Amino acid sequence: MSGKYRKEHNCLNCGQHVEKHYCSSCGQANLEIKENFWQFISHSIAHYFHFDNKFFQTLKPLLIEPGQVTLDYLAGKRARYINPVSMYIFVSIVYFIVVPKKLEHEQEKQQQHETVKNVKAATSDVTKDLKEEGFDEDSFVGKTANYFQKKVNAQEFKSLSFQQQEEQIKQLKTTIDTSKSDKEEYQDLLNKYQRYHIIKQDSTYEAYLSRQQKLPENNRDSWFDRILKKREIAINQKSASGNWSVKEELEHYRPKQYFLLMPLLALFIMWNFRKNHIYYLDHLIFTIHGTTAFFIVQIFTVPLRRLLGSGTLSGLIQFVVVIGIAWYLFKALTVFYQRPKKMIIKKMITLIILYFIAFGISEWIIERSIYYFIG
């Protein structure tokens, strides 16, 4: 501890008698409170490097010796390691600064438009080639090509403006009237286009209410449906502005999601290893250490993959990370719970399934909450 110790033996914090340099009652150092600028800076730096030193002493075994840090910590060997919660908070802050990527809405829309355009051209070429090769439209290959053509056409129709959609619908109605065959197929396509057109038509709540007034009373939405529709239109308008999206808002809630899922994962682990007769808190500390290790790996690998783009090397890094996480979990469970390897593998698979189910449910709840209540 840097700083000058006081000659007086009374603790400035709690008033108890101090024998040496630290109060035996509250633990505060018996230092002079008056210090110059450089003493203040050096004192602060000493505190930082004390944390920094413990952080790196914890980091190495946490990453290369899965489960050992938790064993040592619960055995009372804590002087060398940083507190699990303190380390988790520090690493999670860095994680959620470095890892999440802000969505570029306009660029994303342009990329989607270009993708649909390219896929449509490719699908049209494939369909043309199949016809030239003599493939029957009723064959499996012909039906598959026709299916993809419809999906691409539907995606392109969604991206059209309201007026452009109206023109497409008029042309399709004319085709149905003049066509001697495939009327049922064209009618199905028209029904689908009209559903998309209604969504585009209800771009404002006033437009939605105006359309509702034109419907027979029995076909109008209930008061509850109108509330939900009003919220949906507001969200769509906000997303259309290009400055906000449900997906982007969902990323802001990731820290809370991971934090809330950690105690649940510890509970899943306790259920699976209940014969070890370990307290829930010990399972939770094990889970905190594992989550912290996962965040640290992501902090280094995600920006690297983002820098490399979507090439082979980026995919290889992602594959190695997935394999590494699976190995880490297996090793950590084996070291900490001391169970046979075959049993560890079975329980690990069960834990992964349970966690992904919980993650999916929590994701759906958060997304619905954002959509209808938060955004």
Image (cartoon, helix red, strand yellow):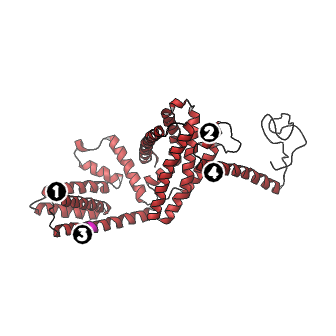
Look at the magenta stretch and give its main secondary structure. Answer: helix
* Marking on residue 185: 1
- Percent across and percent down for residue 231 are 39, 48
Secondary structure type for disc 3 = helix
Confirm or deny contact between disc 1 and disc 4 (CB under 8 A). no
* Marking on residue 125: 3
Which tag, 3 or 4, sits closer to the chain's start? 4
Dot 2 corresponds to which residue? 71
Q: CA distance from mark 1 to mark 4?
A: 63 Å
Tag in front: 3 or 1: 3
Q: CA distance from mark 2 to mark 1?
A: 65 Å
Confirm or deny contact between disc 3 and disc 4 (CB under 8 A). no
The range drawn in magenta is 121-125
Which tag, 2 or 4, sits closer to the chain's start? 4
Answer left or right for 102 relative to 130.
right
Amino acid type of the residue that numbered disc 1 sits on in the rendered structure: Glu
* Marking on residue 60: 4
Mark 2 surroundings: few (<14), some (14-19) or many (≥20) residues within 10 A = some
Is 61 included in the stretch rendered in magenta? no
Answer left or right for 57 relative to 212.
right
Secondary structure type for disc 4 = helix
Which tag, 3 or 2, sits closer to the chain's start? 2
Amino acid type of the residue that numbered disc 2 sits on in the rendered structure: Leu
Which tag, 2 or 1, sits closer to the chain's start? 2
Amino acid type of the residue that numbered disc 4 sits on in the rendered structure: Lys
